[in-house]
Image: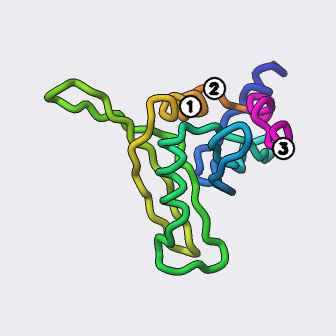
Amino acid sequence: MAGDQTNRNCVIQGNHENLKILQASKDRFGSHLKLEVTLPDERIVIRWGLDDEDYLKIRDIVKGNYFDNLEAGYHYELLPYVVVSLNKPNGKQKFLANLRCVQGQKAARIEFECSERFAGNIEWFKKEVRCIKDLEHLKWEKFKT
């Protein structure tokens, strides 16, 4: 019974604030996002590694002022889902991820094409991450220079 209770307590909450982007940058380990992840048991800041292509796309989105001005509370979130589109003529898959821009009471979803690796990481997060212990290996402090 206690095991069942633990599993119930470690189910990820489905809200749009569980992958808040704090920074998109590069360091000696490579391109990454600094994400604040909100889980039922607590919050954790992690380093989410990126391919250079994904980094450039996300950086350009985050750098822009989506609503033309910056007021208090303006931030971006990585939404935890990916859409797969199939290009019919040549059968190539296209992966589409989403950021959400939040400014006060306004919010907008911004779609961008991402790599298969990025899409796989989103799927891993969605299916496997339930508790802080599932993200310990990505904890921000482990990557400080």
Q: Residue at x 65, y 72 (%)?
A: 73
Badge nearest the viewer, 3 or 2: 3
Q: Secondary structure at mark 3?
A: loop
The 10 Å Cα crowd at callout 3, few under 14, some 14 to 19, many 20 or more, is few
Query: Callout 1, which amino acid?
Result: Asn
Q: Which mark is residue 144?
A: 3
Mark 2: secondary structure: helix
Q: Work out which quarter of the rendered image holds the N terminus and state it.
A: top right
Sequence order check, earlier mark of 3 and 1: 1
User: At which x and y percent is residue 14?
Assistant: 58, 44
Query: Magenta segment, which residues?
Result: 131-145
The location of residue 116, given as percent across then percent down, is 45, 29
| Residue at (58, 55) in percent of width and height | 77
Please rate how many residues cluster around mark 1, counting C-alpha atoms within 10 Å: few if below 14, some from 14 to 19, many from 20: some
Residue of label 2: 128
CB within 8 Å, label 3 to label 1: no
In the image: residue 145, left or right of residue 114: right
Residue under numbered circle 1: 121
Q: Is residue 77 magenta?
A: no
* Residue 18 appearing in the image: no
Up the image or down, 24 lies above or below 120; here it is: below
At a point 80% along the width and 19% down the height, the residue shown is 3
Residue furthest toward the front? Answer: 28
Residue 111 sits above or below residue 11 on the image: below
